[in-house]
Amino acid sequence: MNNRSFSRLIHHLSFRQRWLLPCLSAIVALTIWATSYAQPANAQRGLVDLIFRGIQVIQLSSLSDRQEVTLGGQINQQLLSSEFRLLNEPNITRYVDRIGQRLVPYSERPNIPYRFQVVRNNQVNAFATMGGYVYVTSGLLAKAANEAELASVLGHEMGHIVGRHAVNQMKQQAIEAGLASAAGLDRNTAVRIGVELALNRPGSRRDEFEADRLGLFSLTRAGYAASAMPAFMQNLVSSRSVPNFLSTHPATPDRIRTLNQLIAQNNLAGSAGLDNAAYQSAVRSRLTSQR
């Protein structure tokens, strides 16, 4: 067909028929694009299917700070509704939060909201989940000798959040279990894995040493005594019963040795928080009434 014949044909088409031509062209182009990029198309189709089923999907590899905080909040809500009971002692809660908030500006990730909570449990333990949620047990508060030792624990747990260790571990577990699709990981599954990680966090040597280092520098920048972190660890391993959470972590003597090396190499000092009597008044005496 020559150009004149084609123009005559277009002239005789109705308005609706002429309007359809560019749409058909677009459909053909999209078909070619979809054929060339089959894998992304499958991922998009999977995402659309999940959305229509009412499931929220997240991409852990590109999780923003806001998304991490939201997900951490949902994990926290699940932990507190089914696993833990918070200590009902406002003065202790405020005291622990004040120490934690003192560390926040000196962390390498100060722009997310941190929440420090005390769990009513006699075991010596501390843990964190993504998005700024840090937990210490009443048993750990009773074991610490002073405020600086408690601050060293909070700093370590903040180090896990700064390093996004829970996010990385969640991604790894989801992939290994075959739970992450091309579209991502549905939020309910992410919350479930997050709860499991908070309860039984793998003691990755790299993660623990990084959290120690990050926590130590936050601790000393805030003015607390650097010596408190290795001192508290030494206190724990020297006790008759080593806390369960240390048994799943790298060898504590190695961590103590590394911390002392960091302190010496960087001339870290600080002197705040070593008053045992003040800590006794602020925490230990109040804990007795909660037992």
Image (tube, rainbow, N blue to C red):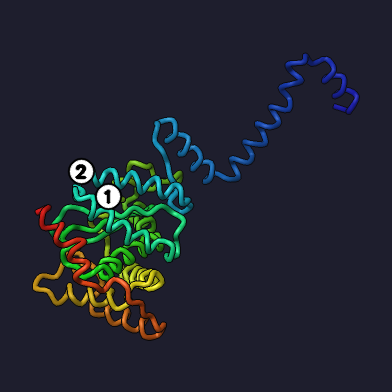
**At label 1, which amino acid type do we have?**
Val
Q: Is residue 41 left or right of residue 11?
A: left
Residue 46 figure quarter: top left
- Judged by depth in the image, the label closer to the viewer, 1 or 2, is 2
Q: Which residue is mark 1?
A: 195
**At label 2, which amino acid type do we have?**
Ser
Q: Is residue 250 left or right of residue 105?
A: left
Residue shown at the point (42%, 41%) measured from the top left: 57
Q: Closer to the camera, 250 or 29?
A: 250
Q: Is residue 280 visible?
A: yes
Q: Are marks 1 and 2 in contact (CB under 8 Å)?
A: yes
Q: In the rendering, which numbered label is found on residue 101?
A: none
**Label 2: how many Cα within 10 Å (few below 14, some 14–19, many 20+):** few
Q: Is residue 124 visible?
A: no
**Label 1: how many Cα within 10 Å (few below 14, some 14–19, many 20+):** many
Marks 1 and 2 sit apart, C-alpha to C-alpha, by 10 Å
As drawn, 279 above or below 11: below
Q: Closer to the camera, 257 or 47?
A: 257
Residue shown at the point (14%, 60%) measured from the top left: 285
Q: Could you tell me residue 190's position as x and y percent?
A: 34, 46
Residue 141 figure quarter: bottom left
Q: SS of the residue at dot 1? A: helix
Q: Which residue is mark 2?
A: 82
Q: Quadrant of the C terminus?
A: bottom left
Q: SS of the residue at dot 2? A: helix
Residue shown at the point (21%, 61%) measured from the top left: 282
Disc with the residue nearer the chain's start (1 vs 2): 2
As drawn, 84 above or below 253: above
Q: Could you tell me residue 51's position as x and y percent?
A: 44, 34
Which residue in the rendered view is the most extreme toward the right?
A: 4
